[in-house]
Image: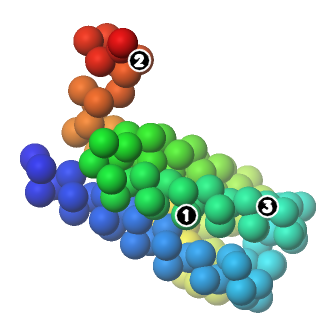
Amino acid sequence: MKALSWIVRIIAAIILLQTLFFKFSGAEESIYIFTKIGMEPWGRIGSGVGEFIASVLLLIPRTAWIGAFMALGIMAGAVLFHLTILGIEVMQDGGYLFGLAITVGVCSVITLVLHRRDIPFVNKRNIS
């Protein structure tokens, strides 16, 4: 279980971290996405900051559950925008970004299940 935890957390963190370059450099696809959903530039930069924080938290065993909650929330927003405004395929990417969002979401759920004992409001014995 420990190995599975590391695998899913690293997968999620790598995906989140690799997309930061595109958000922070103002890549054409990122600007297109956030313009289309009416959140350019503050949404692009804000989601990048959130994804960075979630990535770091995911890689620290004690805070993995917090990073997983953050990543799951951010990815839920991404999936929602794909399903309502953007479409599955964005700028002829074949659904790649949608697939990455689903992957991070699934890895986050697995992390939450594996680390459920660390979540204070789920595991009452951790509450001080």
- Residues tagged 3 and 2 counted as in contact (Cβ below 8 A): no
Gap between marks 2 and 1, in whole Å?
24 Å
Q: Position of residue 115 (x, y in %)?
A: 26, 37
Say which amino acid is labelled 3: Gly
Judged left or right of residue 126, residue 75 is right
Q: Which residue is identified by label 2?
A: 121
Q: Which residue is identified by label 1?
A: 52
Q: Position of residue 63 (x, y in %)?
A: 37, 43
The residue depicted at 30 percent of the width and 65 percent of the height is 10
Q: Residue 58 appears in which quarter of the rendering?
A: bottom left
- Residues tagged 2 and 1 counted as in contact (Cβ below 8 A): no
Judged left or right of residue 49, residue 109 is left
Badge 2 marks a residue whose secondary structure is loop
Q: Position of residue 111 (x, y in %)?
A: 30, 45
- Asked whether 39 or 37 is in front, the reply is 39
In primary-sequence order, the first of circles 2 and 1 is 1
- Of circles 1 and 3, the one toward us is 1
Q: Which residue is identified by label 3?
A: 43
Work out which quarter of the rendered image holds the C terminus and state it. Answer: top left
Q: Is residue 120 visible?
A: yes
Q: How is the image coloured?
A: rainbow
Say which amino acid is labelled 2: Phe
Badge 1 marks a residue whose secondary structure is helix
Q: Position of residue 70 (x, y in %)?
A: 53, 46
What is the total number of numbered labels drawn onto the structure image? 3
Say which amino acid is labelled 1: Phe
Vertically, is 65 above or below 45?
A: above
Q: Which mark is residue 21?
A: none
In primary-sequence order, the first of circles 1 and 3 is 3
